[in-house]
Image (cartoon, coloured by chain):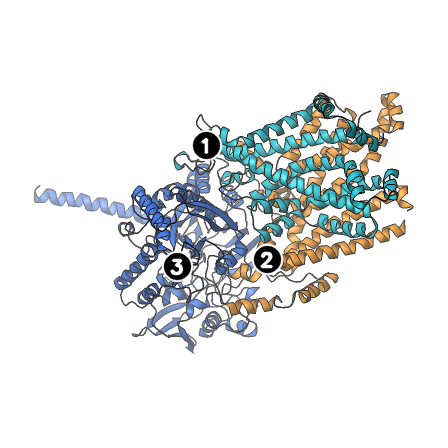
Amino acid sequence: MSTATDIASVDTVTAADRGRRWSAVVADFCRRRPLGAIGAGVVVLMIVVALTAPGIAPYDPLNIDFAAMLAPPDAAHWLGTDAYGRDVLSRIIYGSQTALIVGFGAAFIGATAGAVLGVGSAYFGGRTDLVVQRFMDIFISFPLIILALAMVAILGNTLPNLIIAITVPMIPRCSLVIRSSALSIREMPYVDAARAAGYGHARIILRHMLPNVMAPYLIMLTSFLGQAILLEASLSFLGLGVQEPTAAWGLMLRGAAVEFAETAPWMALFPGLAISLAVFAFNLFGDSLRDALDPKLRTG
Amino acid sequence: MWRYLINRFLLMIPTLLGVAIIIFLLLRVIPGDVVEAKFMSGEGSGVSNEVLAAERARLGLDKPVWEQFAIWIWGVARFDFGISMWTGGPISEEIALRFALSLQVALMATIVATLLALPLGVIAALKQDTWVDYAVRVFSIAGLAMPSFWLGILMILGFLIFFKWVPPMVYTPFWIDPWQNMVQLVWPALAVGYRYSAVATRMTRSSMLEVLREDYIRTARAKGLWLKLILVRHALKNAMLPVVTVIGLEFAFLLGGLVVTEQVFNLNGLGLLFVQAITRRDYTLTQALVLLVAAAFIFVNFAMDVMYAWLDPRIRFR
Amino acid sequence: MNARRMTWFAGILSATASLLLLTAADALADEKPRSGGELIFPVPSEPPSYDAHREQTFGVIHPVAPHYNGLLRFDPTDPTGTKPVADLAESWTVSDDGLTYIFKLRKGVKFHDGAEMTSADVKASYDKIVFPPAGVVSDRKGQYTVVKAIEAPDANTVVFRLKWPAVSFLASLASPWNWIYRAEILAKDPHWYETHINGTGPFTFVEHVKGSHWVGKKNPNYWDKGKPYLDGYRALFIKSSAAQVAAVRGERAHIQFRGFTPADRDALKAALGDKITVAESPWDCLLMVAPNHQKKPFGDKRVRRALTLALDRYAGSKALSRIAIVKEVAGVQVPGTPYATPPAELEKLAGYGKDINAARAEAKKLLKEAGAEGLTFTLSNRGVPMPYEPVAVWLIDQWRQIGVTVKQEVVEAAAYYGVLKKGEFDIAMDFQCGYTVEPDLDLYKFTSRSKNPSNFGFYEDKVLDDLYEKQSRAKTVDERKKYVREFEKRLLDEEAHYMMTLQWHRIIPHSSKVHGWQVTPSHYLNNMLDTVWLSDGPSH
């Protein structure tokens, strides 16, 4: 199967066709990869929850109510309250916003920067490749937590900085994978042909190389999504992430949640479940997507 | 092949040097230094600027940055990492006990992970797209999804509530009291090993699938169970390379990367030392730790490449 | 009632009384210290160096103090931790003008290496603290600027000559940081004590395993005969508070001397019942809010007053004391100590009144007058979770209730001082901890910025400086009280230069086997362990 013709055929389908094709693809995906479909379902649900948070959260997540401190789950507070009497459910609902912003932000930037570096490095080859790869080696062997600690210490812990701190260690991992895919494409005759035809580097990279690394790019992107959410939780747990009183899952697991774990276990249990469920869903979806996109693993 | 190996070996040097330069500069960009962290960040009173300056001079922090770097890297080249800026003790002494602990946890977690990953991965591949496969995948993805520090909190809480038991919280080296040592470390090893097994299980499954799809195996599979088993052994051998790579790299990562887990289980290992060193702005200690962990990572990478070269003729004869 | 019956009644009374006395005596007999056992305690921080003259952390005091003595110490039985008593000094006299202090030293005191302790050692140690040679750091040098000279006229006499009379001088000589070192060693190498131990204290040094533990054993030649009671002690370096609690709970440790949280206390008490004894005290540590006077609109005292009026300290105390190590509502002195303001007086200060609605209405009015309605700012906080984070969450909520929007910015502990020093903040959380409650030590921080670099409100106030001087040189306790009170009123009410949040609260739930240890407002005090004993064999 030639990937090039595949792309060409996509280009020729009409918009109406495309609509039909998409629904067919989705239906096919659900039928053949039930786990992936479940994952996708949870992801969609999470996005909906994050978007409609103000509408569905029963309380203001910042509202302190000392009269209701450490209340166990009941009719008023379905998942109980925390040490400040804030509603745990509402904080989990609002926390999904933080998780998604960090998750999508970091994964998108990390995978894209990695892809650009990987493709560029593979396309230009030679000395450029050598230098870029040495840099990637350096960053990949750098202990991840030190990078994050240093970034936060230098930049301060605001949300955008947190995203950068999570992104940096992802870039080399993605670039390595993309580079190896791109290397094999560079050797393809049509790339040589394009070069012989006198097309500029930009055009060749954009039109021929990038579309062909879309599959590994998407795979990396989805696997980063879960990792970024997990990393954000770890950093917040260490006190290096988002700060109180913002609602964030990792932050909810910190401090009082650990101290009161015995008498008020709901404080540690539910946010941890939320993190696990989200990462689980992203990974299920990402795995199935990988199986679907990676031709080597395609069942015959 | 020798040329390839020597080349590959020499490439480790610029990488390590790059790591050294970056951590050295990074630390100096972070606001504050060890003298301020020590004398100015407590709840006590402050000391005068002259004293701070004198203390900086004593630690060599008043020299130009390039000179500090030269002194440090010259020491490193002779395997002399200097003294910790915070305690004044030799770095090797600061690290020794913590390294032993981290190494042990990493080894134990690796054993846990391997014991879980190989059988699960192979079974999942053989039974692809059946409920067995789904169960294994759900189990392993759950391992990836649960923050291991959260799992740790739940474990400790579970012991406390159901058994009224608290695992020992102070490290006893294995050679002093093996039982105490194991009772303390087995729980973090399980919590970390589970997560780690998830990565390895997935890798085992997918590389098994790949090998199983090679034509000779397909033909064999059609011929019956007995032959199938023999070939699975054969297949497993071929599928092992990427699995070993993943296990090796994760191992290198575990050495310094267990910050949060160490915090939950109160393990005084390299991860916590990392955080302490950087929050205290103990430049020399942070630099030594980063180099140590990076070197472990780079070396494992190198060892993997050597294995690939040895097993894969296309690389061997390049 | 006739006379006879009266006598009879008195007879019964006195019989009951003597019975009571007897039982009391019995109890005392039971309380007779028992020798033996090893005290095990977690220490949340590890000593950077072993030299207390240069360090600031209790991580040095807790494991290392049992190896040393000071010239004076604070009475280990005094719950306020403010009464200086003899340690290596046996007695002392003060000249009438208050400028000369003469100390007679104990005889027959030996260092652990066998050398006799003399006045030369005291002089050398204090010279190192007060007049450190070049290259030697003395952390508290600034507290001894009053000292003109230290003399050792004979082997058992030490004389301190002062530049001006200072009522707090004896207290500063009882500092738990001022260990007496050997002169001969200091002369050879003033840095020797950073990495070695050689004191006169009740315990000798056995080992320090980095990242793990510190062990001391009974000094058989200790000068205070009969003491110490313990055979030895073992300090475990455990950073995680959960693990420290687990150690006490699992009866693997007896006590942690810094303090636990209310949640930890309740969990320990619930799990171990009367095997746990809880000692509590207000803590000589204060979290306060420093409004940066150089930043708009915090130069306006109406805005500052509004911000302090918004705080419902009494309700905050009730709620926060369940989840954080803060409790007492206090002014500039720890409640219960000699110069503390009585609660009824305190209520008259802005933000200390009992009617929170009236206070908040006034706050809103003040903000309106100052044109600062809907004020928005960033609260800079130190990256130490307990109790900084809960107090910040509480503050943000309190200010929200007068329509002020606050964002928290947490700065890592090592970088935080830089932020404070450079004044790169709107409003910052500031803090002060002391080893004893003493107005001279506690109030200095609030004097004008030009005199005192740890004033992070960045203000000048001549009146405050003047009041500080007056209280420091006051002749009588009552006169001093009056000035301290005036200082407090100006600082917290009239000018609202700083805002106090809540006093820290020290909670020490310890094994009921531990006796002879008194909780005080400072976690730097009472760590010599000479008076501590265990009522039962160690739990091996």
Q: Nearer the viewer, residue C151 or C104?
A: C151
> What residue is pinned by disc 3?
C436
As shown in the figure, which amino acid type bears the numbered disc 1?
A: Tyr
As shown in the figure, which amino acid type bears the numbered disc 3?
A: Thr
Instruction: Determine which quarter of the picture holds residue B156.
Output: top right
Relative to C129, does residue C218 appear above or below in the rendering?
Answer: above
Q: Nearer the viewer, residue C82 or C322?
A: C322
Chain to which mark 3 belongs: C
As shown in the figure, which amino acid type bears the numbered disc 2?
A: Arg
Q: Position of residue C487 (x, y in %)?
A: 32, 60
Q: Nearer the viewer, residue A295 or C301?
A: C301
The alpha-carbon separation of the residues under discs 2 and 1 comes to: 42 Å
Disc 2 on helix, strand or loop?
loop
Specify the label residue A59 is tagged with. 1
In the image, taking residue B242 as reference, residue C519 lies left or right, namely: left
> Alpha-carbon neighbours of circle 1 within 10 Å: few (<14), some, or many (≥20)?
some
Q: Nearer the viewer, residue B120 or C500?
A: C500
> Alpha-carbon neighbours of circle 3 within 10 Å: few (<14), some, or many (≥20)?
many
Mark 1 near mark 3, Cβ–Cβ under 8 Å? no
Instruction: Determine which quarter of the picture holds residue A51.
Output: top right
> What residue is pinned by disc 2?
B281
Q: Residue at x 52, y 70 (%)?
A: B50
The chain assigned the colour blue in the figure is C
> Alpha-carbon neighbours of circle 2 within 10 Å: few (<14), some, or many (≥20)?
many
The chain assigned the colour orange in the figure is B
Chain to which mark 2 belongs: B
